[in-house]
Amino acid sequence: MSRSLAPAGRLFAVAAFLEGFTWAGLLIGMAFKYGATGNDLGVKVFGPLHGGAFLFYVVVTALSALRLRWPWWATLLAVIAAVPPLVTVPLEMGFRRMGLLSARP
């Protein structure tokens, strides 16, 4: 049975998506910058957006870990997931399946 997401769980899901989306935008921007076109507009746009999304994700991860009483390994995994590109989205999906984003009974 699926439980509904807690408010902190919903916020974590949004933060994970934003972090992943801005990572993808930054990667595409870097491909254009260092590719044949040499256009750095994507990096100029998505660089700061990703920096902000990363910081937002880290703060929301800490808040979610405290509010939802995550085990230490889940908190560590969530923080590490922000470093490699596009890992926060599948992590969020896994946390959702495990019930880590739902309110504790």
Image (tube, rainbow, N blue to C red):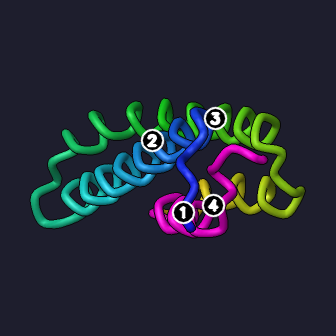
The quadrant where residue 44 appears? top left
In magenta segment, residue 93 = yes
The quadrant where residue 84 appears? bottom right
Mark 4 Cα within 10 Å, few/some/many (few <14, many 20+)? some
Q: Nearer the viewer, residue 3 or 92?
A: 3
What amino acid is at disc 2? Val
Residue under label 2, please give it: 14
The picture places residue 53, in percent across and down from the top left corner, at 48, 36
Q: Is residue 55 above or below residue 77?
A: above
Is 66 displayed left or right of 40 in the figure? right
Q: Magenta residues?
A: 86-105
Residue under label 3, please give it: 60
What amino acid is at disc 1? Ser
The picture places residue 97, in percent across and down from the top left corner, at 57, 68
Q: Nearer the viewer, residue 18 or 64?
A: 64
Which dot, 1 or 2, sits closer to the camera? 1
Which dot, 4 or 2, sits closer to the camera? 2
Residue 81 marker: 4
